Amino acid sequence: MAELQMLLEEEIPAGKRALVESYQNLTRVADYCENNYVQAQDKRKALEETKAYTTQSLASVAYQINALANNVLQLLDIQASQLRRMESSINHISQDFNQPYIGLFLTFSSL
């Protein structure tokens, strides 16, 4: 239960915040790269710098998405496990509840 709560209250919201921050940072990086290219005397160097920033940024975002996806999958696994336990408990209660009536039905049907 503590793991579920930690995922819901900390890990997943932190992952979402990291993606929002990355979006904001990527916007600034894109603006910088555009301005740098426009103002650069050496366009080839500016282009190489832009490629490096792009590669680094995409790798960072891919890592963040992977981490968030793993947390969501872990959350779903925990919830599925909880549902299986609840289903088992409900089936057990149902059997306990129906057992006396089955015996009573069998008694009346044999008369």
Image (spheres, rainbow, N blue to C red):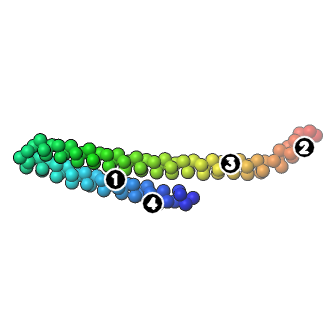
Question: Image check: 91 left or right of 1?
Answer: right
Closest to the observer, 4 or 52: 52
Q: Which residue is mark 2?
A: 107
Whichever of labels 1 and 3 marks the residue nearer the N terminus, that label is 1
Residue 38: horizontal and vertical position, in percent?
A: 9, 47
Q: Nearer the viewer, residue 59 or 102?
A: 59
Q: Residue at x 32, y 49 (%)?
A: 60
Lower position in the chain sequence, tag 4 or tag 2:
4
Q: Amino acid at mark 2?
A: Thr
Q: Which residue is mark 4?
A: 10
| Whole-number angstrom distance, CA of label 4 to CA of label 2 | 57 Å
Q: Residue at x 17, y 43 (%)?
A: 48
The reply to whether the C-beta atoms of the residues labelled 1 and 2 are less than 8 Å apart is no
Residue type of the residue flagged with mark 1: Leu
Q: Tell me the amino acid under the disc marked 4.
A: Glu
- Give how far across and how far down residue 16 sits, in percent: 38, 54
